C-alpha cells in the first residue's frame, strides 16, 4: 500500500494564481482531511470529508475549496492565492472519525509570493 | 483559540534517560487523545492513544498518562533513543469529526 500520497511536494505561486493540491489514499478510508501547518503552530483543519460526495468545513476554510467525487481522492483547491496561504499542507485519512488514528501524507510546501 | 496546548516548544534529553512531553487542553468534552511523531519533511505518524475511560496506556517504550481533572496528558519515553528525535504533537477529539492539535514539542535525544 502506498498509503496517502500528495502532489506536488513543493510549489511557488504568485499572488492571485490558483492551484489544486492532489491527495490520494489507497486504504479505502471513508474519512479524509486537509490540514495546514504554519511555522511554530499546530495543524489546523481546513476541510474534511466523511465519504464520497460529502465535505464539511474545518477551523480555517476561507480561501479554499474541496471536492470528493471518489473514496480515494480529495483535492484541495486554492483560488486567488494570497501570502497568508504560505504553509505546509497535509492530507490525511482515517477509517472512522474520532476513535481512529489518521494516516498522513508527506505534505506539500506552498509559497505564495 | 488554541484548545490543545504544548507549552514546551523544545526538550533535550540524554540517551537512555526518560523524556516527558506535556500537553494541556481546555475543552472538558475531549474524550480521546493521540500522540503523533513527525520527522522533518514527512507527515505525522501515529504513536499512541488514550481514551478518557483510562488514565494510562503503554506501548513498549511509550506510555501516555491522562489526568482528566487537570486536563493534562503526558507522553513518557523510556529509555530515550537518538531515533526518537522528532517533533511530537498531541491531538484531542470530542467524539466528533475533528481532531485539535497542539503546537508540537521538538525532542532532541543527545547520544
Image (tube, rainbow, N blue to C red):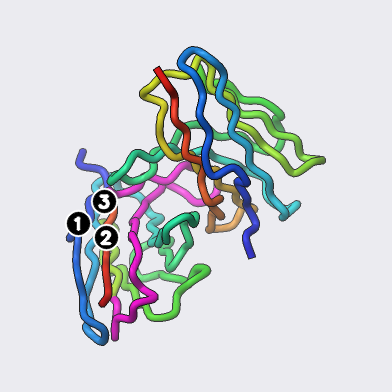
Nearest the viewer among B34 and A26 is B34
Disc 2 target residue: A109
Is residue B60 in sight in this rendering? no
The answer to which of B62 and B94 lies nearer the viewer is B62
Q: Are marks 3 and 2 on the same chain?
A: yes
Say if mark 1 contacts mark 2, CB within 8 Å: yes
Residue pointed to by mark 3 = A25
Q: Which residues are magenta?
A: A78-106
Q: Is residue B40 left or right of residue B15?
A: left
* Image quadrant containing the C terminus of chain A: bottom left
* Residue drawn at (32%, 42%) of the image: B40
Magenta region includes residue B103:
no
Q: Quadrant of residue A1?
A: top left
Distance between the Cα atoms at labels 3 and 1? 16 Å
Secondary structure of residue under mark 1 = loop
Q: Is residue A86 above or below residue B91?
A: below
Mark 1 crowdedness (10 Å alpha carbons): few <14, some 14-19, many ≥20: some
Q: Position of residue B41 (x, y in %)?
A: 28, 46
Q: Earlier in the sequence, mark 1 or mark 2?
A: 1
What is the distance, in whole Å, between disc 1 and disc 2 at their CAs? 6 Å
Chain of the residue that carries numbered disc 3 in the rendered image: A
The vertical placement of A79 against A93, above or below, is below
Q: Is B10 placed left or right of A64 in the picture?
A: right
Q: Is residue B57 left or right of residue A82?
A: right
User: What SS does tag 2 mark?
Assistant: strand
Label 2 environment density (alpha carbons within 10 Å; few <14, some 14–19, many ≥20): some
Residue ID for mark 1: A9
Of discs 3 and 1, which sits in the foreground? 1
Amino acid at each position: 500500500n502506498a498509503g496517502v500520497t500528495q502532489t506536488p511536494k513543493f510549489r511557488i505561486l504568485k499572488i492571485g494564481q490558483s492551484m489544486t493540491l492532489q491527495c490520494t489514499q489507497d486504504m479505502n478510508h471513508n474519512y479524509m482531511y486537509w490540514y495546514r501547518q504554519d511555522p511554530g503552530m499546530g495543524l489546523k483543519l481546513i476541510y474534511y470529508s466523511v465519504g464520497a460526495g460529502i465535505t464539511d468545513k474545518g477551523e480555517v476554510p476561507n480561501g479554499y475549496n474541496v471536492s470528493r467525487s471518489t473514496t480515494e481522492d480529495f483535492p484541495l483547491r486554492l483560488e486567488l492565492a494570497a501570502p497568508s496561504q504560505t504553509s505546509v499542507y497535509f492530507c490525511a485519512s482515517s477509517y472512522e472519525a474520532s476513535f481512529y488514528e489518521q494516516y498522513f501524507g508527506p505534505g506539500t510546501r506552498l509559497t505564495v509570493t | 483559540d488554541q484548545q490543545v496546548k504544548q507549552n514546551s516548544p523544545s526538550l533535550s534529553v540524554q540517551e537512555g534517560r526518560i523524556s516527558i512531553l506535556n500537553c494541556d487542553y481546555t475543552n472538558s468534552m475531549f474524550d480521546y487523545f493521540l500522540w503523533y511523531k513527525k520527522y522533518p519533511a514527512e507527515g505525522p505518524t501515529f504513536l499512541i492513544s488514550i481514551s478518557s475511560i483510562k488514565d494510562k496506556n503503554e506501548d513498549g517504550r511509550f506510555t501516555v498518562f491522562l489526568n482528566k481533572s487537570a486536563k493534562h496528558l503526558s507522553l513518557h519515553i523510556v529509555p530515550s533513543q537518538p531515533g526518537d528525535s522528532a517533533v511530537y504533537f498531541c491531538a484531542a477529539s470530542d467524539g466528533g469529526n475533528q481532531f485539535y492539535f497542539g503546537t508540537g514539542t521538538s525532542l532532541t535525544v543527545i547520544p
